[in-house]
Amino acid sequence: LNISAHKYGNYHKYYTFHPSSARISFFSSGDVFKKLWDAQGQPNVFSIIDIGCNEGNLSMDVLEQAQKELPSHVRCTLLGIDLDSSLIDLAVAKYVSADNATPIAFAPINFMNSVASKAFLDKYLIDLSATLKKEVVGFSMVCLFSITMWIHLNFGDDGLVDFLARSADLLTPLGSLVVEPQPWKCYKAADKRCRKLGITRPLHFSALQIRDIEREITGMLLPTNTEPVSTEPAAASSSEKAAVTAVTPVEAKKVYTQIQAGMQCHWDLGKEGWGRTIYLFHRSGELQHNQPVPVVVEKNAIADSENVSETDVQPSADETASAVNKAEEGIHTSKKSKLN
């Protein structure tokens, strides 16, 4: 029994029951990469990162589709990261070769270890710039496929907000964020699975306030208010007797995420066979054919749940101090790829 998979979602043989073809079809049917590349100013480098890449199947499909749609002079690059080093080893065995022509890398990184992951990613971009002999200041596309639920369950509402803000912060100034959030019914299924198997239930399940997942994530990433938000009540003037309501810390952080993400438009790419919608958020308002995201509120989405005992899942100081070295020792890269 792989207990870790039921806790963090790092399932082995994941693509046997959720094939990557079900997702990549939404990208291949509408010239998505060509439109993004045009909206980003037709850069000479199109860099992709897949956070929670598993064995890399979908990561590589995204890279291949970008290469099919973009002009041959555009250097497409890929970095896949996952907290499970055994999954990274499988990705390397399948996709990394010294005979390849495209920069491809897979690394065992826990993105929620913010200090170590930032240090690693900063160094990765510096090294990539040296390899390409072109400055790479961020990622053209950040992919978050079916990972938001696992972040949310293990790090709570604040963890989800921080995760989205930090993911968006990896983008170039005109970059794009792909998000495939699991709806609330998947959370309930994950909790039920743990109870049935007799393993520790999801850490924050009962305490989560963010449960209308798709609407909340869309609201966090699309700014509706650029004014600073205080967590304290504003003092009413002597002439004003109206009541003032304080903004809760989570609400304040949501607005902070809106400002930090700075997304200007979004695109609903479609819903795959198991009921998850793929959303594309873009920092430029010039993306063509952007559509409003249709949101369906699940029945009983805010239903009460049982209490869950909590334990600390944050990385220890020793883990943080050594994570960069471990990641650099474990990173598998290729400056060449079989892809054209």
Image: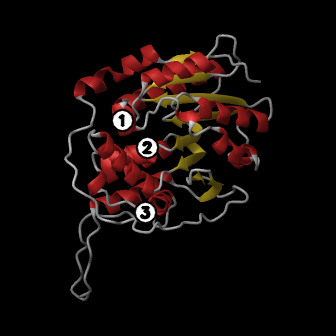
Q: Amino acid at mark 3?
A: Asp
First of labels 3, 2 by sequence position: 2
Q: CA distance from mark 3 to mark 2?
A: 21 Å
The residue tagged 1 is: 114
- Left or right relative to 294: residue 242: left
Look at the numbered disc 1 and give the secondary structure of its residue: helix
Q: Tell which tag, 3 or 1, sits nearer the viewer.
A: 3
Q: CA distance from mark 3 to mark 1?
A: 26 Å
Q: Amino acid at mark 2?
A: Arg
Seen at 61% across and 58% down, the residue is 266
The quadrant of the image that shows the C terminus is: top right
The residue tagged 3 is: 212
235 vs 169, nearest the viewer: 169
Q: Tell which tag, 3 or 2, sits nearer the viewer.
A: 3
Q: Position of residue 181 (x, y in %)?
A: 50, 51
Q: Amino acid at mark 1?
A: Ser
Residues at badges 1 and 2 in contact (C-beta under 8 Å)? yes
Task: Note whether residue 151 is visible.
Answer: yes
Q: How many marks?
A: 3
Seen at 62% across and 65% down, the residue is 292
Residue 259, quarter of the rendered image:
bottom left
Q: CA distance from mark 1 to mark 2?
A: 9 Å
Look at the numbered disc 3 and give the secondary structure of its residue: loop
Task: Note whether residue 41 is visible.
Answer: no
Task: Give neighbour class at mark 3: few <14, some 14-19, many 20+ (Cα, 10 Å).
Answer: some
Residues at badges 3 and 2 in contact (C-beta under 8 Å)? no
Task: Give neighbour class at mark 2: few <14, some 14-19, many 20+ (Cα, 10 Å).
Answer: some
Which numbered circle lies on residue 166? 2
Residue 304, quarter of the rendered image:
bottom left
268 vs 141, nearest the viewer: 268
Q: Position of residue 330 (x, y in %)?
A: 45, 16
